[in-house]
Amino acid sequence: KNRSSTPDDDDNLEYAVANPQDIWSNVDTSHCTLRLLRPHEHNDSIHTMLSLLESEFGCMVGSNAYLTPLHSQGFAPHYDDVDVFILQLEGYKRWRVYAPPNKMETLPRESSRDYTEKEVEEDMGCELIMDLMIGPGDVLYLPRGWIHQADTVARPAHMVKVPSSGSGGKGMSGSKDSDAQGPRGHSLHLTVSAMQNWCWADFLEILIPEALEAAAASDKSISLREGLPRNFLSYMGTMHQLDDEDSGPEGLKQALEAVAKASSGEDGEVDEAVLAEAEAKQRIRARQNHFKDEAKKRIMRVCKQAMSMLDDACDQIGKRFLSDRLPPALLEPELSLTKAASSLSTSSKTLGNPHHDPTKKIWPNTLCRLVRPNIARLVIEDSKAVLYHCLDNSRVYHGTPLSPMEFEIDDAPALEQLLTTVEPHWIMVKDLIHGDVEDKMEIAQALYDEGILATILADAPDRSVQTG
């Protein structure tokens, strides 16, 4: 029911070759749902769609496919830790969607257990938000944390009959589909999921530990390295919590009133034991308040350090995203502007690039831009400018590790210009920020050879400067 299982989940699985007859027997006879994990690893169209969605959303996107027999339900009611788009491909389904049961389970970071319908509707009192039918071509959005359940139904009379996919009117199983709603009335849908481990808490889990380490090692303040107050455990902790004066024990209130009267000279008997207890509690409260003030100062120092490290944390989570995401499925108009143009047909090769240079050389007057926004990121590591990109990623999750490109630190301004120039804009090589034209050409050439730079020549090559 989640976006897709990760390789970590798969490590403990034992794989076997499935017998098609056994599969269809379980689907048709036992009313089992057939789930295909990560179909984008095998299907170019799904990969292209997810790649474009990753560029649009700016986070990792995954998919699963589900085939459910007529009058069957694949999963018990539950909620997911991801935002999900249901793309109905064949057949019809009834979906019931419920609002989150409470604030604690709103926008959850983990998926729920399986519920029963009685739990959801009676015990938990969840509000039924939607009860609807969807058919081929429909899309349903399920926000993270919204409980849902679905079952396959026959085509409702009010819904228009849609021709089934496949050759010769046959569905996925190859059987004749006279009702045009999937093989034997099955439902086939694709789930597209996003935003897994992509909330503010995930970002702060990266930022705060780094900020704490940096603040503790600071040469401007030693406060975080100072020892804790002597014997602070004798007055701090749950067992030492005191109620506020306005809601404290009656005896403490009376003692405090007595202390006030005594100090103001008013008549009144004072219980010495109660007074001693009240004074002891006042001393404890003073120590507690002092401890809290000192802790607050140090917490604020860490927070101040964190605010100065926001860009560093963004680079960290940005590198993680580049490592996790799919390789960009570049479209022909994009490919025609890269070094991969030579593998395209002649008509596609010259699309938008009338001065295609078969030598694949970068010239001072070459116009450049990143072939697709946000597929590469520049960070500074160990006084080097390091460029990460996802072009060589595998469709298999973490199948190919990132291979960073390392440059000198003074190359960073030119690299930043190239990585932030995206469609529809261009930048000319000779206009890059750097000392001399040769260095500018070499930087652009390196990115072009890597396949992440799109180029065009509006005029004939400027051969006044040669490199390599």
Image: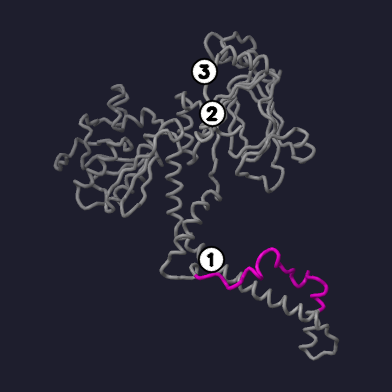
SS type, badge 3? loop
Q: Quadrant of the N terminus?
A: top right
Percent x, y for residue 259?
78, 84
Q: Residue at x 69, y 21 (%)?
A: 72
Estimate the x, y position of residue 415 in percent, counting from the top left. Answer: 31, 47
Is 232 a magenta residue? yes
Which residue is at a point 74% across and 68% down the rendered structure image?
Answer: 243
Question: Badges 3 and 1: C-beta atoms under 8 Å apart?
Answer: no
Is tag 2's residue or tag 1's residue first in the polypeptide sequence? Answer: 2
Range of magenta residues: 226-254
State yes or no: discs 2 and 1 in contact (Cβ < 8 Å): no
Q: Is residue 188 left or right of residue 310?
A: right
Q: Is 246 left or right of 184, judged from the image as shown?
A: right
Give the vertical position of 276 relative to 316 (above or below): below
Three-letter residue code for mark 1: Met
Q: Which residue is mark 1?
A: 300
Q: How many angstroms separate mark 3 from mark 2 (CA)?
A: 13 Å
Q: Residues within 10 Å of mark 3 (few under 14, many from 20)?
A: few
Residue 154 lies in quadrant:
top right
Is 170 within the magenta?
A: no
Give the residue type at disc 3: Val
For label 2, the residue is 13
Q: Give the structural element (helix, strand or loop) at label 2.
A: loop
Give the number of the disc on residue 17. 3
What amino acid is labelled 2 in the image? Leu
Check the image and name the residue furthest to the bottom: 265
Front-lying residue, 181 or 282: 282
